[in-house]
Image: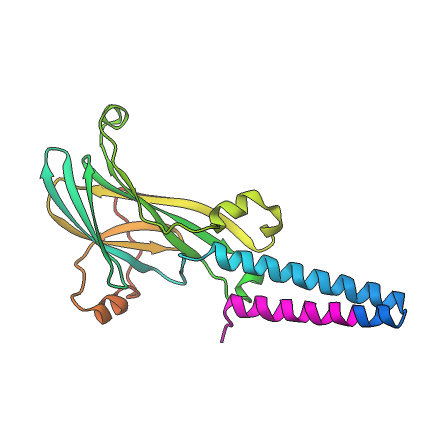
């Protein structure tokens, strides 16, 4: 069974503190070699604990992804020429409705893929939905018409997607971070499953279950790997 990353960080920090206390004891007995060695080990362990803590905070809001799963169910309802609403229902029961402009529904996400050594710490591929927008089929309209974009992700003090770009020290742990997007027509009433896998986002026709327990079960129901024409990673 994998331990939460926060517990691992606390344990490593505690071990580092023990080494620093032992270093102080060695200094009191005037044992310079033992003092130096224990001090270096203590500082190194506390530095590792700090990195683990930063990773833990930076991945708040990201969902673990070990197989294809449903990130949300979406009902699209046209409300006028190149206008529509998109009602999202998430596996935890939350709902959100967005008024959008365009011919198509567009959603993108952040994907984090960790290296095998990070898997030992309980870190696997993770995702977070980032934004929803209305998309126009014609490039001219996309450049000139009204754009509607809303956030889907949670605001946080640190985001691992940004930290990886800023700090090279995370390179040995994080294999790759990338964005994935998918879009579908929004010119008629339709219900979709927004699915996410290690290869990115995809839409499939689907209806949200009624109960919350059914939502949770359906979100991890395995399916095939076919994509709609609008999917891209």
Q: Position of residue 221 (x, y in %)?
A: 28, 66
Give residue 149's position: percent from left, percent from top. 28, 38
Residue 155 is a magenta residue: no
Q: Residue at the spot x=67%, y=71% of the render?
A: 15
The number of callouts visible is 0
- In percent of the image, x 89 and y 69: which residue is there? 31
Q: Does residue 83 appear to the left or right of 195 in the view shown? A: left
Give the image location of residue 133, x and y in percent: 26, 40
Secondary structure, magenta segment, majority class: helix
- Given the current orientation, which residue lies at the most extreme front position? 28
Reply yes or no: does residue 2 show up in magenta: yes
Question: Quadrant of the rendered structure where residue 28 is?
Answer: bottom right
Picture quarter with the C terminus: top left
Q: Camera-side residue: 115 or 87?
A: 87
Q: Is residue 36 rendered to the left or right of residue 20?
A: right
Where is residue 20 shown, x and y percent of the image? 74, 67
Residue shown at 41% from the left, 44% from the top? 179
Q: Is residue 108 among what the camera can see?
A: yes
Above or below, comparing residue 227 to residue 122 in the picture: above
Q: Is residue 115 visible?
A: no
User: Which residues make up the magenta segment?
Assistant: 1-23
């Amino acid at each position: 069974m994998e331990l939460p990353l926060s517990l691992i960080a606390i344990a490593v920090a505690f071990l580092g503190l023990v080494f620093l206390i032992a270093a102080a004891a060695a200094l009191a007995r005037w044992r310079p070699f033992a003092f130096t060695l224990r001090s270096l080990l203590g500082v190194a362990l506390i530095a590792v604990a700090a990195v683990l803590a930063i990773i833990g905070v930076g991945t708040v809001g990201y969902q673990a992804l070990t197989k294809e799963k449903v990130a949300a169910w979406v009902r699209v309802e046209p409300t006028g020429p190149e206008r529509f609403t998109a009602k999202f229902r998430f596996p935890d029961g939350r709902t959100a409705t967005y008024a959008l402009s365009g011919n198509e529904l567009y959603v993108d996400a952040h994907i984090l893929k960790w290296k095998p050594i990070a898997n030992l710490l309980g870190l696997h591929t993770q995702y977070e939905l980032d934004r929803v927008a209305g998309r126009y089929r014609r490039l001219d309209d996309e450049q000139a018409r009204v754009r509607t974009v809303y956030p889907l992700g949670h605001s946080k003090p640190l985001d691992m997607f940004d930290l990886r770009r800023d700090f090279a020290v995370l390179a040995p742990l994080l294999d790759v971070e990338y964005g994935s997007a998918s879009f579908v027509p929004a010119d008629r009433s339709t219900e979709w499953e927004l699915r996410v896998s290690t290869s990115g986002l995809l839409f499939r026709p689907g209806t949200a279950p009624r109960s919350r327990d059914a939502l949770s079960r359906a979100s991890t129901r395995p399916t095939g790997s076919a994509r709609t024409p609008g999917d891209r990673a």
